[in-house]
Image: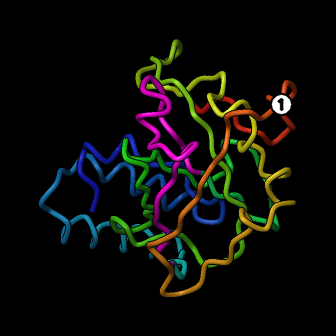
Amino acid sequence: MFCPEDVRMLRKIHPTWMAAGVAMLALLNLGCGKSTGVDTAMEQQMKDLKLQKASVAKFAGHVTIDGKSPREAYPKQVLVVMLSDTKNPKGGDGLLKVICKSDGEFEFSTYDRGDGVPTGSYVVSFAELTPGLMASKRGKSLRGPDGLMNLYNDPDKNAENSQFKIDIEQPGKTDWNFALDVQGKQPIGTPGPHAVTELK
């Protein structure tokens, strides 16, 4: 299960089982090394809420920016990989998301570390954002401007590119590769309504 250092990697949970996600987040306070107890508690909570676990498949891989790792390309920002449900596209709060490691590796989790995301069709999008303290409450936000010049942060725009339209089926894949090109491209000055320019 998740340790405190993984909390920063968590992203909003799919709306159909948001209540279970809230319960899981509450259980993070029980600590690491107690996965059996946490798993049991989460299963009981889902049972109480009359929810079932979704079928999940692995989604992990590697991202480069102009042939470089995210840390090399943008040392002061973090690269966020996001998945948008093609049947129900939404902005930042409705996306599944994870922060890439500095070398560009990413791994999505739903119930257990690295277990993936609910199976289905998605659009992948990306944003290079700057970590910052949230003004209104404790925690951190990710703020723009997008280091990728709004070229890859719009799921509506990415849906027009077959490279970013993916089907995730069991058992999933852990060798996805996304090569993003930014140099020499014209920035998008006005992002679309679902483009991610910040995350709270």
Which residue reaches farthest left?
A: 33
What's the amino acid at mark 1? Ile
**89 horizontally vs 14: left or right:** right
Part of the protein shown in magenta: 57-81
Which residue reaches farthest bottom?
A: 170
Across and down, in percent, residue 167 comes to: 68, 77
- 200 w.r.t. 98: above or below: above
Pick the quarter of the image with the N terminus.
bottom left
Across and down, in percent, residue 177 comes to: 54, 64
Residue 64 sits inside the magenta stretch: yes
The residue located at (34%, 68%) in the rendering is: 112
Q: Nearer the viewer, residue 6 or 66?
A: 66
Across and down, in percent, residue 90 comes to: 77, 50
Corner quadrant of residue 88? bottom right
The residue located at (29%, 67%) in the rendering is: 41
Query: Which residue was labeled with disc 1?
Result: 188
Corner quadrant of residue 2? bottom left
Q: Nearer the viewer, residue 71 or 27?
A: 71
Across and down, in percent, residue 171 comes to: 48, 87
Residue 175 sits inside the magenta stretch: no
What kind of element bears circle 1?
loop
Pick the quarter of the image with the C terminus.
top right
Q: Residues within 10 Å of mark 1 (few under 14, many from 20)?
A: few
The residue located at (16%, 54%) in the rendering is: 32
- 32 w.r.t. 45: above or below: above
**154 horizontally vs 117: left or right:** right
